[in-house]
Amino acid sequence: MKIYDISLPISPNLPVWPGDPKIELEQIASMDKGDDANVSRIAAGVHIGTHVDAPHHFLNDGRTVENLKLDILTGTAFVLHLDDDVDIITAKILDAAPIPPSTLRLLLRTRNSHQWTSDSRNFDPYFVAISADGAEWLVAHDIQLVGVDYLSVAPFDAPIPTHQILLKAGIIALEGCDLSQVPQGKYELYCLPLKLVGSDGAPARAILVGGVEN
Ligand SMILES: [Zn+2]
């Protein structure tokens, strides 16, 4: 049984959304310096690396991340490969894609995933994301969780519509997946966001297990 760790490594090297706080992860007690134990601290926004968005992020409706359903966050998922020349994921592209009819969790691999294998760690505003009509397509096809391989499900210049459409429908947005090593196909997804009370999002460890190449 193969396990793909699709989580990004959290460190100050990870690109963060423009305007969000930088990731601080530092040791504050050190055995090398005579302390009894090594202790680190972290300070960061909650939308860092591989993370989920709760509806409260764009709807201000009190549906926060600790209440997201674990039975949506875990279960069978389909990883779809999109060609490197896809700039935006539209309804037309999703319609033409070989997504199995009963898919509830859909992870979209685009050219974004190449970024996670390179040394480039600057924020890229030209990342591939889901258009508003692509989001409508996901709602119409009963998708419950959608994963993308950059830091937002929505295009940089139009963050609101895609997020609102997905979150209103109760679709969990899993953002910042590294799908660079994952062949197209079906897997078991285990996505476990930190149980941050009252938060609009949370970093998650996410893995895909198994898989049959399509
Ligand atoms: Zn987010």
Image (tube, helix red, strand yellow):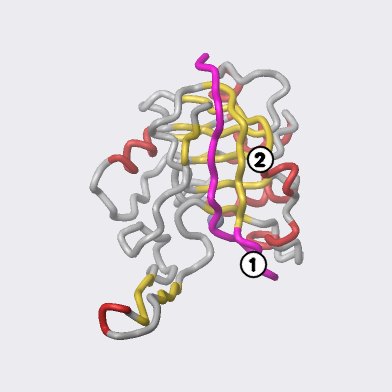
Residue 71 position, x and y percent, is 75, 43
Label placed on residue 196: 1
Query: Disc 2 versus disc 1: distance between alpha carbons?
Result: 19 Å
Looking at the image, residue 67 lies above or below residue 165: below
Residue name at image x 54 percent, y 58 percent: 203
Residue 139 position, x and y percent, is 72, 36
Tell me which corner region of the image, top left, top right, bottom left or bottom right, holds residue 58.
bottom right
Looking at the image, residue 26 lies above or below residue 147: below
Question: Would the CB of label 1 be found within 8 Å of ligand 1?
Answer: no
Residue name at image x 37 percent, y 33 percent: 111
Tell me which amino acid carries mark 2: Leu
What SS does tag 1 mark?
A: loop
Label placed on residue 145: 2
Q: Is residue 208 magenta?
A: yes
Q: Is residue 114 magenta?
A: no
Residue 88 position, x and y percent, is 47, 35
Label placed on residue 30: none
Which of these two is toward me, 147 or 7? Answer: 7
Q: Nearer the viewer, mark 2 or mark 1?
A: 1
Mark 1 Cα-neighbour bin, 10 Å: few <14, some 14–19, many ≥20: some
Magenta residues span 194-214
Whichever of labels 2 and 1 marks the residue nearer the N terminus, that label is: 2
